[in-house]
Image (tube, rainbow, N blue to C red):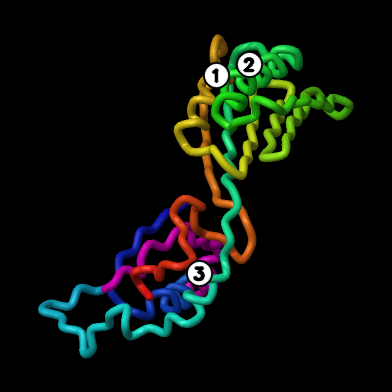
Amino acid sequence: DFKLLLVSEHDDIVNELKVVTKFVERTTGLESEVRLINGGLWKKQENFRASHPYSPDDYDKTSPLEQWKSQHPLGLQTITQMETKGPLSKEWVRNLLVNAMTSLSVSSLDLIDEEIQIQEYDDLGDGCVLMATWSEGSVFVLWDGRGHVDINLFAYEGLDSLKVKHFNNLFQRRTALSTVLYDEHPRGFGRVVSYKHDFDPDIEPHWA
């Protein structure tokens, strides 16, 4: 096993390397393998000045502005992944969801007059899926039967990062669960990219 490290400033180093490796194989009978090529960095140009500096005004904003105005954010979706090395069970996961919903959803999402039913599906695999829906949102909990839990929470109104954090803290209470991933996304139609509380269709974006 023979290893060779090469350093070159030639722009055509890849083609030259191919020629060299083929020559080595043909003359020595050895098989060659290029395992790694580092490069592609821009060469520094001293005292560089662009021939034409571009600003945002030089770009056509018609399509982005049409997309911006077409969006209709309706709510917020958050996805949280939790993991633990401690024991979990279907009954325990269900109780965690019940506690979190009772403490958070009724007080924070204004569901005092609406009863929330939690449905459970455990006829496939070792874990379970818990689903709770109401007129203004939903929450899905997936347990893989081991130490991984996914929580998918959505609401049209009354949901923000602080309330989701509170919900997750309540879900994790008295367990060894810890958050390993958290994502939040505005949901709606019209290629939504803006949060509902940040978007006003009557106000032009600053880049328009």
Between 130 and 73, which is closer to the camera in this rendering? 73
What element does badge 3 sit on? Answer: helix
Cα distance between the residues tagged 3 and 2: 39 Å
The residue to which callout 2 is attached is: 99
Residue 127 drawn in magenta: no
For this view, does 187 lie left or right of residue 13?
A: right
Name the residue: 53% across, 42% down. 183
Three-letter code for the amino acid on which mark 2 is drawn: Asn
The chief SS type of the magenta part is loop
What element does badge 1 sit on? Answer: helix
The residue to which callout 3 is attached is: 68
Cα distance between the residues tagged 3 and 1: 36 Å
Query: Furthest-front residue in view?
Result: 113
Say which quarter of the image contains residue 172: top right
Name the residue: 52% across, 74% down. 22
Give how far across and how far down residue 107 sits, in percent: 56, 24
Three-letter code for the amino acid on which mark 3 is drawn: Trp
Residue 26 drawn in magenta: yes
Q: Is residue 202 above or below residue 16?
A: above
Query: Furthest-right residue in view?
Result: 123
Between 71 and 24, which is closer to the camera in this rendering? 71
| Disc number for residue 157 | none
For this view, does 112 lie left or right of residue 28?
A: right
Q: Few, some or many C-alpha atoms within 10 Å of disc 2 (few <14, some 14-19, many ≥20)?
A: some
Between 186 and 28, which is closer to the camera in this rendering? 186
| Disc number for residue 170 | 1
Mark before the other along the chain sequence, 3 or 2: 3
Q: Please state the extent of the stretch shown in magenta in the rendering.
A: 22-42
